[in-house]
Image: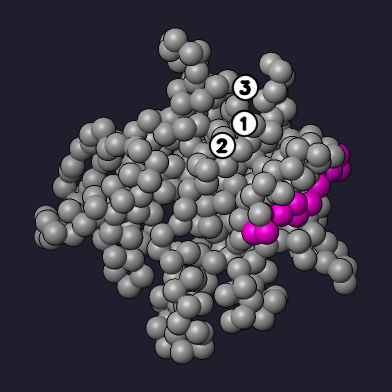
Amino acid sequence: MVNNNVDSLKVAEIGEQGLLQRLHQFCPSEIIGDDGAAIAWKSDRGENLVVTTDVLVDRVHFSDRTTSAQDAGWRAAAANLSDLAAMGAAPIGITVGLGLPGQTPVRWVEELYQGMVSCLNRYHTPILGGDVVRSSVITISITALGQGSPKQVIRRSTAQPGDAIVVTGAHGGSRAGLELLLNPELKGQLTPENYQVLVRSHQRPIPRLDILPILLSLTQSDGASIRVSGMDSSDGLADAVYQISTTSGTGAIIEAEKIPILPALLDWVPPAKALEWALYGGEDFELVLCLPPATARALVETLGPMSAIIGTITKETGVCLVHSAGVNHIESLTGQKGFEHFKF
């Protein structure tokens, strides 16, 4: 039963997306709704300042069972850099807010920062500062700053019918790695090489900042620019397509057989399970981009075999997953299989 009494309404009843929709009223409508906020910046080059914030909580986003302190630091930094990549922005730096129980080992905190710096150094990105407070649970809050041309901003809401849907890499690996870490007895089912590939996919995801110069070369020429819509797949591939379609007022058709999946995953689990993890597992940190077909083909040719055109944006609303044996309709992805805070 739907609770229409605002005074007694609980966050768990509306979930993360429902809460965010209610909070949008407090923010400028032209800025919010993407992986970050692009703000006109008074710089000599006329670039946008892009700001994004992520919060990671112990036993929600990471745990000692699956994630060392260094891996937690890497993943925290990677999540924010991925949001910048999803906005078409190059990183400037990050700030870190930590909530820590008093009994947290100092060594753990130092290793957390070592993991952050290991990730950030790949992209010449510094830690600019932060804050530390006492907390009953370990909480890591990172704000990342980036910059980019207004012509390069990637938004969720600009997809158009006829656009090709591109994924920049394989999906499902992070979810598979989590499964292996949660269930150590499964390790013997894989070769050592495949085990390491999947576990590393979960513990050390790579934000796709390398895509930005390639996109720039393909979409900016002779003063003209080609529109690109998209976001990252941190909450799942299916969720990303659903969010882009919903905010753009369009629909989408995804071809299941075209979704790239790591060979290490296909060697381990049945195809149906691999597809489920690819669609709904999340935390693969690839980009899901919608752009004109010719540009999409050029992008995939440049990126290589783990990138792919997986579908098309349609005029009709709704997201359909097409199999060679039939059609399945994907409904309310964030409310069902996709990850959403406060939904259990």
Circle number at residue 216:
1
Residues tagged 1 and 2 counted as in contact (Cβ below 8 A) = yes
Q: Tell me the mark number nearer the camera, choosing from 2 and 3.
A: 2
3D distance between C-alphas at marks 2 and 3? 12 Å
Q: Residue at x 20, y 37 (%)?
A: 131
Residue 315 falls inside the magenta stretch: yes
Q: Amino acid at mark 3?
A: Lys
Residue 309, position in %: x, y? Answer: 75, 51
On the image, numbered disc 2 is attached to which residue? 212
Q: Is residue 316 left or right of residue 337?
A: right
Residue extent of the magenta highlight: 305-317
First in sequence, mark 1 or 3: give its number. Answer: 3
The residue that appears at 42% across and 88% down in the rendered structure is 185
Q: Residues within 10 Å of mark 2 (few under 14, many from 20)?
A: some
Q: Is residue 319 above or below residue 66?
A: above
- Quarter placement of the N terminus: bottom right
* Label 3 sits on residue: 151
* SS under mark 3: helix
